[in-house]
Image (spheres, grey):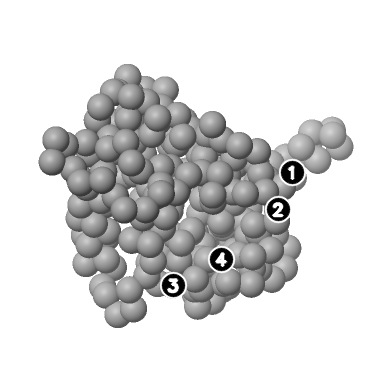
Amino acid sequence: MTPSTSGRELRADARLNREQIIEAARELFAERGPDVPAEEVARRAGVSTGTFYRRFPDRQALISAVALDGFQRVVTIARTAEDEESNAWRALTRFVHQAGTELRLATWLSVWFASSWADLQKDPETHRLRQILLKILDRLVQRAQSDGDMRPDVGTGDLALLIAQLLRPVPGLPNELTQRSVNRSLDLVLSSLQARADNQQLPHEAITSTDLNPGGERSD
């Protein structure tokens, strides 16, 4: 084995270990909350505690990696829904339900680790992914409204904030009941956003993606 081959294998092993740790932390955070010990994350990932700390020297580094991984998954879900669904309303519905788990974890992380979350929002990659997601959602909302499937007096920001509020953790609920409640709440929100002849005009101005991202590029 040449030194260059050995180096590539080490890099591949390190990358795999990192991915396994992120996936294990993601699962454990979703199951049990933020206080899972590092040793348990390492055990779930199938790596030693030493390997864990080489990849993630502190909890903030782990939280940032899990959150960024979640953002990437959400963007992939949104892109796939837009590409595969010819109907924008079906694409939005698919996105909301498929991204629910990732969005719920992201919302929980923002509650549990407010200071780490504030730092993460300044990260250039997080900003880039946020821009991509808002642009996709803007396109889907506008198309669904043009098709007459979505009520015209709501904006992308309304949809994003409704979902974020629904996914905030409720203390004391068993995991199964939490998931069932989230699914039903998302269905209720989607139902309320559909266009109907008897929809009453909302009394306040729609919240747009630009309202959520005033310092960034426009998403329209």
On screen, residue 191 versus residue 17, left or right, reads: left
Question: Where the C terminus falls, by quadrant?
Answer: top right
Look at the numbered discs 1 and 3 and tell me whether their residues touch, using CB distance below 8 Å.
no
Q: Which mark is residue 11?
A: 1
Measured along the vertical axis of the image, is residue 169 above or below residue 124? below
Residue under label 2: 123
Residue beneath the point at 57% across and 72% down? 113
Q: Foreground: 192 or 200?
A: 200
Q: Closer to the camera: disc 1 or disc 2?
A: 2
Question: Where the N terminus falls, by quadrant?
Answer: top right
Q: Which mark is residue 130?
A: none
Q: Closer to the camera: disc 3 or disc 4?
A: 3
Q: Amino acid at mark 3?
A: Gly
The percent position of residue 50, horizontal first and vertical second, equals: 69, 68
> How far is the residue under mark 1 from the one under mark 2?
24 Å
Question: Can residue 80 be seen?
Answer: no
Q: Amino acid at mark 1?
A: Arg
Q: Amino acid at mark 2?
A: Asp
| Earlier-in-chain disc, 3 versus 2 | 3
The percent position of residue 170, horizontal first and vertical second, equals: 33, 73
> How far is the residue under mark 3 from the one under mark 2?
24 Å
Residue under label 3: 33
Neighbor class of circle 2 (other Cα within 10 Å; few <14, some 14-19, many 20+) is: few
The percent position of residue 25, horizontal first and vertical second, equals: 51, 62
